[in-house]
Amino acid sequence: MATALAAPPGNFDAERVRHDFPILQQHVNGRALVYLDSAASGQRPLAVLRAVEHYETHTHANVHRGVHTLSQAATDAFEGARERARRFLNARSTREIVFVRGTTEGINLVAQSFGRARLGRGDEILISALEHHANIVPWQMVREQTGCTLKVAPINRRGEIELDALLGLLSSRTRLVAVAQVSNALGTVVPVERIVQAAHSCGALVLLDGAQAVAHMPIDVRALGCDFYAFSGHKLYGPTGIGVLYGREELLEEMPPWQGGGEMIRTVSFERTTYNDLPWKFEAGTPNISGAVGLAAAMDYLESLGLEALAAHEQHLLAQATAALERLPGIEIIGTAAHKAAVISFTMRGCHPHDLGTVLDSQGVAIRTGHHCAMPVMTFFDIPATARASFGCYNTEADVAALVAALEKAREVFG
Ligand code: 7TS
């Protein structure tokens, strides 16, 4: 992030980028759409829509099963997407790239395969108070199943993980540390390299929830040193229902499958079944083939924008929005970490975030309101919900101005 921050934002032409996204050309409630909800789901550029349409129109068949031409073409497209994802993450091998439905399924895979098989009483899993429910509930389920202990590193009033407290919770009993690289509710960028280093020195593995990171910074799983990395395609301008779980090959090799069925087997008899090689051992059933094709196109698109210039642009919008919201009476920004990605969570005095969201929607401004699937974060700040604006590659200074104008309008409505 530090290098991205230093890059001049002038390199990035968001106005041009907007034209790649047909959905942004429409009006909502009679106003030009201002889409500030990319942390929930990014929109898709034409390149992704066309790649999916081309696959569905010309190439579709089931994969890994037929000698016929289409089946081989579909298999090539699907496995080509896996190689694209390997490159995106800088993983060593495509055996380390498991296609899943999204971040949630990736984390559940690790919880049910690694966690359930390997953990027991006395073993500890360490997460943080910043996590999305997808990185809390699967570990609570493993706790129920195995009797292991779940520990939670606290956060401070800025919305940063208390690093010293987290390091203090690590011990030889810690088997896995699972943290988000970027918080969805507050935008906090977590110093995951430091956490990986400390966890490994205790002999613990590390899973990173990359859902909010992948669209905003280059990801290199080998440089990060993490053992598992999960993300969703729809957060990086790709389709829904597709995502990736990266796992180090030695670990995946030793882990049992978590779902049984076709694709994941080598031989089946009623007495004994043997399992397929990596990564297919973890991909039971017909996969989301067109989703993988769309995801590969999204990775091409995102990298073509230049991730460093994009990050600088988003940081510029975040700084501008933060300064503007700080000037608005009655607005409190929730989450003021020193390092943030393009997310700004806030409350307005005298107005429930849902009502605020409705007034903004009537102005054509789409933000997310609620607990953002991070209820413990809301509990920590003693609030039921926040309003959250999040920025992506197609957002402009005009979008920030529209947000501020809509908030001023809301102020008038709610007095
Ligand atoms: N982890 C983080 C940090 C997330 O932000 C999300 C989704 C998930 C996991 C789950 O991803 P999924 O694709 O499997 O659903 N976050 C949000 C959000 O902030 N608003 O809507 C979804």
Image: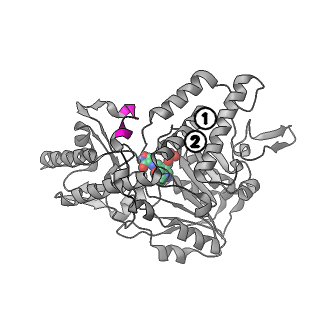
Q: Are marks 1 and 2 in contact (CB under 8 Å)?
A: yes
The answer to whether residue 343 shows anywhere in this view is: no
The span from disc 1 to disc 2 (Cα, nearest Å) is: 8 Å
Question: What secondary structure is the stretch in magenta mostly built from?
Answer: helix
The residue stretch that appears in magenta: 16-23
Q: Amino acid at mark 2?
A: Arg
In the displayed structure, 288 sits above or below 244; it is above
Other-residue count near label 1 (Cα within 10 Å), few / some / many at <14 / 14–19 / ≥20: some
* Rendered location of residue 16, percent (x, y): 36, 39
- Determine the residue positioned at 76% across, 26% down: 66
- Determine the residue positioned at 32% across, 31% down: 25
- Determine the residue positioned at 36% across, 59% down: 378
The answer to whether residue 218 shows anywhere in this view is: yes
Q: Amino acid at mark 1?
A: Asn
* Rendered location of residue 236, percent (x, y): 48, 45
Residue nearest the observer in this picture, 82 or 261: 82
Residue picked out by circle 1: 288
Whether ligand 1 has any atom under 8 Å from the Cβ at mark 2 is answered as yes
Lateral position of residue 6 relative to residue 298, left or right: left
* Rendered location of residue 196, percent (x, y): 58, 68
Q: Secondary structure at mark 1?
A: loop
Residue picked out by circle 2: 101
Mark 1 / mark 2, whichever is N-terminal: 2
Lateral position of residue 239 relative to residue 17, left or right: right
